[in-house]
Image: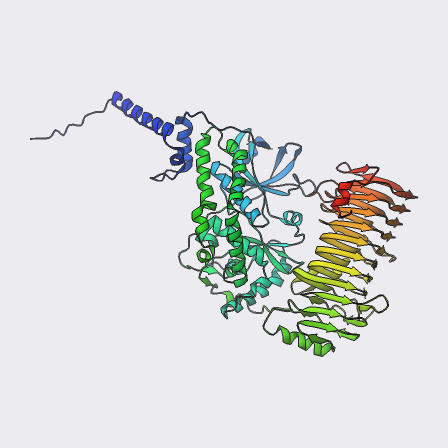
Amino acid sequence: MSRSVKHRLIGARAWLMAVAMVAVLLFVGFRFVDTDRLAGDWPLGIEHHEVDGYAALLDWRSDTASGTAERYLISSAPEACLMEERGPGWNTHWFEAEGFGDSVEVRRLRTEPGGFVIKFKRSEPFRSQRHIVLSPARVSSLRAKYLEILADELGLITPEVSFVRIIACGKDQGLFLKEERIDDDFLEKRGLPGAALAEFGHDASRPDHLFPDFDDDSLAMTDLTPVLARAYGELAAGRTDLLPYLVDARAAGALLVMAWIEHGPSAFDHAHVMAYDWSRGRLVPLYRRSRANPVARTAVPFRMSDPLTLAIVDGTIRQYVRERWSKLSDEAWRVRERFAAIDRAWLPILAEGQALAVAQARMKQIQEELLGSAMLAADPIKGLEASLARHAGDASLSLGLETTGYWPGDDDAAILAGFAERTKAFVRGDTLVFPRGRYLISSDLTVPYGHAVVMEPGARIEIAAGASVMIQGPWHVRGTKRNPVFIRAADDGAPFGSFTVVGDGTTDVRIEGLQMSGGSEGRLNGVYASGMLAIHGAAGTIMRDCVISGSHGEDLMNIKGGEVQLRDCIFENGHADLLDLDRCTGTIDRSVFRNGLADANGDGLDVSASRILVTGCTFSNLKDKGISVGEASQLLAMDSRFDGNSAALVSKDLSVAYASGNRFIGNGIAFAAYRKKPIYGGARLVRYTNVLEANARDEQADEQSAIITEAVLDEKVRRMFGMP
């Protein structure tokens, strides 16, 4: 039997029937198939956005999503359409959003196709943000919002994520994910002013990942590089317990948890960002979602030894990872409720025109990947453990790098004993004690971590020119008014650096009967101290009957963090600010702030991101401000005297100051409220019953701020400051 070789032509009718049958099958499938199946993975390389496109055409369900996102208009000359720009540089465009309009600089986002970075003027940031990052959004982009929630739950510093609609080149460009870029302004608003931002890569095949990439801070690179080199050397010798002295251990544990949640075993295929906090000499890990896809590894199957990969080896940080993971597991139900709230707010917007049930099913799957039972049952430590290697050129790059200052070791007790022998102090247990007598500190001194220092009545400490002292444990000064403790410059004409305490958040500082003078500021052991007397990271600082005077640096005294209780103290004759409080809460009572130096130009009390009650104090002859309340602080001044100051009480930058029962005599301005730093907003000052005499001006406020007069101190205000 022979087979015909004649080709039969398929007619138009057959083609139409085939197309119609496929369309019917697609319609039936998309109309009736389970939403979880539609949201799942598809074979043959079919991607989610392709499925969504078919579903939008063929799924006639009644739950089609709709919503409204804020609109950003980015306009320019017709020949300079934003969406057509391809170069790496910045270009000028006009930007508009509700309540804002200004020219901005825009460039393409290198790490994400179709994305942009917008830079606003430093003098006019957009809603307190200097830079924002925009990238095209779809339903799955809500994952970035989930990651933000998880980072917040873990206590990490992370940018806020939201969604906006971009209008550019004369038409709607669709929805974009918007987040603030991590920069200097971002860090300042989150309690890390002046911190140095660095990016760490983990690829041992890339020499540029050998040391951190600092963003315009060569000093941080100079200080930190030799410390990292030594840490890597210690690791090679089998010692890993030094890392918590270099990196904020709790934040490192939290970041490792986030890296595991976001990327699983491939966490170290992505770069991470950290900020070097000069006030503590520590790297602070930050969380920023990864934008670029990881680079495939072929030749070198190892991870670079850097702070994050070392962190998973360190016992202390591993314990923090376990604690964070356990807490997150216990509270997963509450986190899922936050996810659900985000879904209600954003899914109708992101899924516009699509079936809402399909979008919900897809996000449910993503939530399960991030925080489902399978994820919570896994062990992040085991999953993140990696083989560590150094680049072949690291030895030559590390030549000549020497670590200066103190580095923790097994010989801490010997270091303490050696110093005691040189100065004639003595060691009692883990405490360095200065009894009555005269002691000369001729060069920089760093007291080992955790060791306390006690100064007894009659102790006289003299510090050589330029030398600084750092205590890394509790500090107790036990002087009295009649028998004080003295800390002074060895040479009256040559100031010493700084006397600094660096705590770990639990450190106790108690200072009574101290008289200190003749210092300036200093850098020691990777820490910058702006005050002659500086206390960083203490849990609490108590001062009684002290006289702090005659400094030559930025601050007479600076306290960063913790509870403060200051009483019956005198702060006088500083080159700039007398007392600077950052991120503190507490009270200042019956103390004097005055300045008689002709060339001084500073505040008496300067508070930032703090809540302080001031009672019964005196502020006299300050060339700048008696009290400066800034950076979202709250302060209540009561029963105090302000005389002869350029400005008496000033509230600025989202702060609120309250004044009740004070006397303002002969000041340039009694009350002022204004915005100083554009990344913040205006301020408020509430004045109750006060006495004002012979001031050149009673009050002054800018257009962003307000000074309000009230009759009686509100009970809510009293409770805010812990008053009965």
In the image as oriented, which residue stretches furthest toward the front? 724
Picture coordinates of residue 616 (x, y %)? 85, 51
Residue 187 visible in this rendered orientation of the protein: yes
Picture coordinates of residue 516 (x, y %)? 80, 65
106 or 649: which is nearer to us? 649
Left or right: residue 192 versus residue 617 is left
Residue ID at (11%, 30%): 3
User: Count the marks: how many?
Assistant: 0
Occupied quadrant, residue 409? bottom right
Query: Where is the N terminus found, in terms of image quarters?
Result: top left
Picture coordinates of residue 308 (x, y %)? 52, 58
In the image as oriented, which residue stretches furthest toward the left? 1
Left or right: residue 394 versus residue 491 is left
**Model colouring:** rainbow
Residue ID at (80%, 43%): 658
Left or right: residue 437 versus residue 505 is right
Residue 76 visible in this rendered orientation of the protein: no
Give the vertical position of 354 relative to 295 (above or below). above
Give the vertical position of 436 relative to 186 (above or below). below
Give the vertical position of 282 relative to 42 (above or below). below
In the image as oriented, which residue stretches furthest toward the top? 13
Picture coordinates of residue 168 (x, y %)? 56, 32
633 or 288: which is nearer to us? 633
Occupied quadrant, residue 597? bottom right
